[in-house]
Image (cartoon, rainbow, N blue to C red):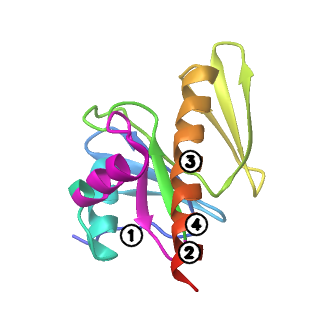
Amino acid sequence: MKTYEISNETLAIIPIDNYCSKVMEKDSSFTVQQTPMQIVENSCAFFGSSYKGRACGTKKLIGVSHKAPIIIEESREIIFFPTSSPRLYECQWISLKNIENYHKKNNLTTIVFNNGHLLELDMSYGSLDNQILRATRLESVIRVRKNKTAF
């Protein structure tokens, strides 16, 4: 089975039936025969770490262990965050760097990606805002540490 690796092009990974996922990229969307969690785990491994190792890193860096954002690939600052507990099948994974905006619409929250694509989520605006803030904090800590070690 061919595995999918997350890249700068990946916007979101959405679970669908029968352990398949819809992968949204900047220029296309397609189905992959893997769960979102399998894609995240395989992508972490592809870039030289494990999901568990990345989750431990997030906890050490920003103190978050529940619904924690994950650094998929550090040098390109590819950070994804879950929409719910990663243990749940319905958990979606969203790319931090590809979000342009997000807003509340009725009982849904809509993400506007930087290529104009929209993704409606069945989660509260406050929950999404919190997940984005956590992921942004992780991104900031990484950037500060990179800048300190660059000199």
Please, is residue 122 above or below residue 52 in the view?
Answer: above
Closer to the eye: label 2 or 4: 2
Give the class, few, some or many, for how many residues have Cα within 10 Å of label 2's Cα (few <14, many ≥20): few
Please, is residue 86 above or below residue 42 in the view?
Answer: above
Which residue is pictured at 58% across the width and 86% down the height? 151
For label 3, the residue is 137
For label 4, the residue is 143
For label 2, the residue is 148
CA distance separating discs 4 and 3: 10 Å
The amino acid on which the numbered mark 1 sits, given as a three-letter code, is Glu
Residue 5: assigned label: 1
Q: Earlier in the sequence, mark 1 or mark 3?
A: 1
Which residues are the magenta region? 53-76
Quarter in which the N terminus is drawn: bottom left
Q: Secondary structure at mark 2?
A: helix
CA distance separating discs 2 and 4: 9 Å
Give the class, few, some or many, for how many residues have Cα within 10 Å of label 1's Cα (few <14, many ≥20): some
Q: Secondary structure at mark 4?
A: helix
Residue nearer the viewer, 138 or 34: 138
